[in-house]
Amino acid sequence: MTGTPSGEELKACCAAAYSSDVVALLLGDSYHPGGTALTRRLADGLGLTTGARVLDVASGRGTTALLLADGYGAEVDGVDYAPANTALAQGAAQAVGLADRARFTTGDAEHLPYPDGVFDAVVCECALCTFPDKARAAAEFARVLGPAGRLGITDVTIDPTRLPPGLTGLGARIACIADARPLQDYTEILAGAGLHTLHTERHDHAMLRMIDQIEARLNLLRMTAAARLTAAGVDLDAAPAVLAAARTAVADGVLGYALLIAERPPQ
């Protein structure tokens, strides 16, 4: 890819990256900082009840959707840009007997394939930061929520004025860093879509734990699957410096992770 990639090209790159087996090797079951523990905190903040209709945007291989269906009794729809992820998520739902409460569709977060006002809650974990048109995605979140419906987000935050050069560019964007925003920017994007932020939390420590996890897995895979990583585009020589830069950025308050709960006002 040469020049500045289009929005569709960026979405295709992200979809290809996050449906690859190498990403699964590096990140494990949950593709976001905080893992299922933070997902449960997000679900608790949404006040989910049995039978609630929930949309998981950028649902990946189904980890969050299946947790909400199993642990909270929700009726969950997951939508992801990558057909491979959709197929894997559907298979996972069938394997654990949740296919009747967790359904998966291939689709675009900026053009959600659902009618207006059908969901009690929308969740989006570590994905809004990758969407080329964040305002459009936020408008879609608001559109599919019913009155007093809630949105739960966990996502990467950055101070773009202080982001080091090693954490910019297309690779960093796919890694959820380069086009992330300050927490205040996310609240303003949601406000522009008519969503009122009720609560925010910092979880920067979760970002540090994920960096440590990636580093440990890279070191192990360097010995057992170096050729596979290289074939998938992982630069093993550059990786230690990038991880070190990310760890320093978290310590300096430049890079972090946050939880946000917003609401569509009652009509």
Image (cartoon, helix red, strand yellow):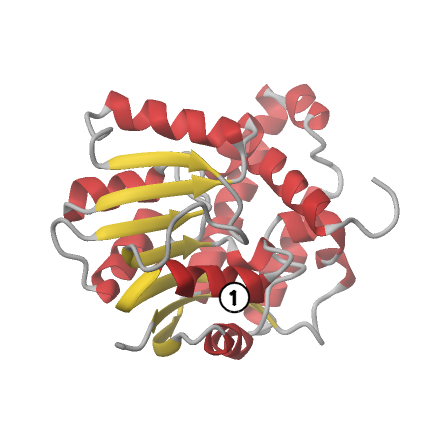
Instruction: Residue 40: name its quadrant.
Output: bottom left
Query: Can the viewer see residue 25 in this picture?
Result: no
Q: Residue at x 87, y 43 (%)?
A: 2
Q: How many marks?
A: 1
Q: At which x and y percent is residue 170?
A: 74, 49
Q: Is residue 143 above or below residue 192?
A: above
**Quadrant location of the N terminus?**
top right
Pointer 1: what residue? 256
Q: Residue at x 65, y 55 (%)?
A: 244
Instruction: Residue 62: name its quadrant.
Output: top left
Q: Is residue 85 left or right of residue 169?
A: left
Q: Is residue 37 above or below residue 143?
A: above
Circle 1 packing at 10 Å, graded few (<14), some (14-19), many (20+), is many
Amino acid found under the numbered disc labelled 1: Gly
Q: Residue furthest right?
A: 3
Q: Is residue 103 left or right of residue 142?
A: left
Q: At which x and y percent is residue 153?
A: 40, 62
Q: At which x and y percent is residue 227?
A: 69, 20
**Quadrant location of the C terminus?**
bottom left
Instruction: Residue 224: name its quadrant.
Output: top right
Q: Residue at x 53, y 45 (%)?
A: 108
Query: Can the viewer see residue 165 in this picture?
Result: yes
Q: Is residue 100 left or right of residue 110?
A: left
- Please name whichever residue, 28 or 64, is drawn nearer the observer in this view of the structure: 64
Q: Is residue 139 left or right of residue 169?
A: left
Q: At which x and y percent is residue 211?
A: 53, 50
Asked which secondary structure carries label 1, the reply is: strand
